[in-house]
Image (cartoon, rainbow, N blue to C red):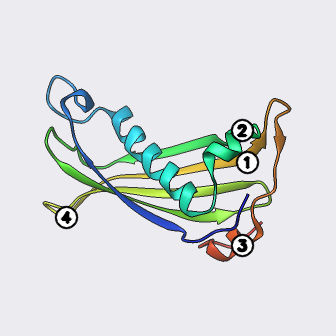
Amino acid sequence: MPGSRHNAIQTEEEVMFFDTDAGAVVHNLAYLRFIETARTKLGTQLGLNLTKMAAQNQYAVLLRTEVDYKKPARLGDTLHIRGHLESTEKVRFWCAFEVHRPSDKSLLVTCRQQLALVQLPEGKPLRLPKDWQSFSTTPNS
């Protein structure tokens, strides 16, 4: 796995009809799809080539998700999803995300996710790239 480049990402999503419930409010799982897109792009920026990793049966496995829903997004909204590598350990790492609606400067959702790099099918944890430690915003364990 190659080294890191940038530890932050911003993506943009337009809320589609299929993202909403009967009241045209974004369904809670749609936010996780938006975050998944940002997390995948963040991984690429950090040097994780997901195609090459999958060919070697190496995966970033989601261990935990913490989400706070603050305000609803609605059908037609444009959202900005900001994410960054928050902290690292030897084999686990945390990413943090915020979903914003720029039209009214609202923070809609905050999310933290813990992941680990794993070799499958054995389930063997893999060490994180050493240069990721320089991107952590909290002390390493």
Q: Which of the 4 image quarters holds residue 81?
A: bottom left
Q: What's the residue at 13%, 60% (across, down)? A: 103
Q: Secondary structure at mark 4?
A: loop
Q: What's the residue at 37%, 44% (across, down)? A: 34
Q: Earlier in the sequence, mark 4 or mark 2?
A: 2
Q: Position of residue 15 (x, y in %)?
A: 22, 41
Q: Amino acid at mark 3?
A: Asp
Q: Amino acid at mark 4?
A: Lys
Callout 3 touching callout 1 (CB < 8 Å): no
Q: Earlier in the sequence, mark 3 or mark 1?
A: 1
Q: Earlier in the sequence, mark 4 or mark 3?
A: 4
Query: What residue sits right under mark 2 in the picture?
Result: 55
Q: Earlier in the sequence, mark 2 or mark 3?
A: 2
Q: Secondary structure at mark 3?
A: helix
From the viewer's perspective, is residue 130 above or below residue 114?
A: below
Query: What residue sits right under mark 4 in the picture?
Result: 105
Q: CA distance from mark 4 to mark 3?
A: 34 Å
Pick the front one: 60 or 103: 60
Q: Position of residue 14 (x, y in %)?
A: 22, 45
Q: Position of residue 72 (x, y in %)?
A: 22, 43
Q: Residue 131's mark? A: 3
Q: Earlier in the sequence, mark 1 or mark 4?
A: 4
Q: Amino acid at mark 2?
A: Ala
User: In front of the other: label 2 or label 3?
Assistant: 2
Query: What residue sits right under mark 1 in the picture?
Result: 117
Q: Secondary structure at mark 1?
A: strand
Q: Which of the 4 image quarters holds residue 91?
A: bottom right
User: In front of the other: label 1 or label 4?
Assistant: 1
Q: CA distance from mark 1 to mark 4?
A: 35 Å
